[in-house]
Image (cartoon, rainbow, N blue to C red):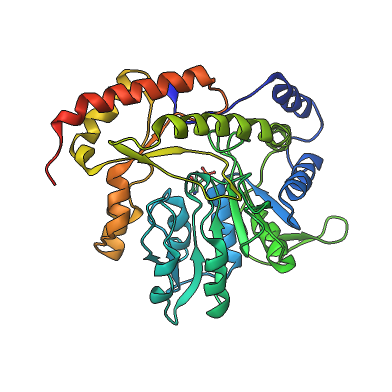
Amino acid sequence: MIPYSCQSINQEDINEVVRVLQSSHLTQGKEVELFEEALCAYLGVKHAITFNSATSALLTAYSVAGISQDDEIITSPISFVATSNMFVSLGAKPIWCDVRLDGNIDETGIEALITPQTKAIVPVDFAGKSVAIEKIKEIAEKHKLLIIEDAAHAFGSSIGGKKVGTFADMSIFSFHAIKPFTTGEGGCVVTDNEEFARQLRLFRSHGIVKKKLWNSDMQSMGHNFRLTEFAAALGRSQLGRLESFIAQREAIARYYDSVFAGHKLFGIIKLPENTRSSRHLYPILLNPSLHCVKEEIFEALQNKGLGVQVHYKPIYQNSFYKECFGEVRLDVAEDFYRSELSIPCHQEMSLEDAAFVAETLLEVLESYKHRACSF
Ligand SMILES: *Cc1c(COP(=O)(O)O)cnc(C)c1O
């Protein structure tokens, strides 16, 4: 089975982890600091604070942003549930904004959703393609709102040479095994804001500040959301390989783009000039004529060795969200969910693998086109 995404671990990565496992510090040593410095240098940000997952990074970012009971957060339903779960866990309410045909929040719909309770905008860079961040920043500045960007898919993405992570008040990345690069589990928040950075560090480690000798002081509420030293060493080693990962995913994506261009049964997502995507996912969008056979197509592809996946069921369709916040329907988000299929695109694949994926996909879709759905 060729998975839709997967990690790439080489001997150097393994050597780095083993080196740290044999050292005196498995946690709270120098490796996390070195990894955070490397993240800052790569992205061009002042502060990078690592966490044991992007989910804890999100919870921490929302907490230090002051998000609390009855605040409203404008966000996208086309994401992993953690994006909204973490502010809902603080008592805030999701205000769903519909998406564009590329799965990113439709920035033209944001302003109409703003109320006196609105506290922040939380966009998600779907598949690694940056949201319209400049427009979103204009809206946020006009209404004095924070932007907390869930960039879990987008490490290494950029606009006009500026990395995703340098635009929002705080940006969150994930280092889960199948994200753009990995520490096994892990994540970070990046920011240029000194005060946010200080509070992010405190919240990560019990709210404790070291005083003199044995004395320490717990100044604010905190958790243990720390990354281990060996995970940080793996992260630093992986970060050194990231450009080669993105180059391979880009080569595969461009190959798909050229083979799939103008196809009658499905569409692809184009990237604007002057941007780069991490290519975390390669989504295709099935035409409505195939929506009613999507489950059969999915199974047929899996049976032929393609580890396809669907990203994502709109978050508001989950039973927890229906019970807490009622029924929601957003036309483009629903349509996107019916159309979307993520096909294999990762750095462990060769262009021959990509050719096999493309051939198999076209063959399967052709075999279903006569079963066209009525709509
Ligand atoms: C993976 C993911 C997360 C959660 O990341 P973890 O590191 O697994 O906690 C959050 N948001 C999005 C959009 C993701 O894809």
319 lies above or below 373 = below
Taking 76 as reference, is 66 left or right? right
Q: Is residue 338 visible?
A: yes
Q: How many marks?
A: 0
Q: Position of residue 13 (x, y in %)?
A: 70, 26
Quadrant for residue 181, please give it: top right
- Compared to 320, does 66 lie above or below? below
From the viewer's side, name the closer residue of 151 and 271.
271
User: In the visual, does 344 lie left or right of 245?
Assistant: left
Q: Which residue occupies 46% across, 32% down? A: 258
Q: Residue furthest front?
A: 262
- Single out the residue that lies furthest toward the right: 213
* Image-based side of 193 in relation to 89, left or right: right
Q: Give the side of residue 262 with respect to residue 201, left or right.
A: left
**Residue in the picture at 51% in, 52% down:** 125
Quadrant in the picture for residue 53: top right
Q: Nearer the viewer, residue 174 or 363?
A: 363
The residue lying toward the viewer, choosing from 53 and 302, is 302
Q: Residue at x 46, y 35 (%)?
A: 257
Residue 202 horizontal/vertical position (percent): 69, 60
Residue at coordinates 29% horizontally, 60% vertically from top-left? 330
Residue farthest toward the left in the current orientation of the protein: 374
Residue 367 picture location, percent across and down:
22, 23
Res. 320 in view = no
Position in image of residue 260 (x %, y %): 39, 32
Which quadrant, please, contains the N terminus?
Answer: top left
Q: Is residue 109 above or below residue 370?
A: below
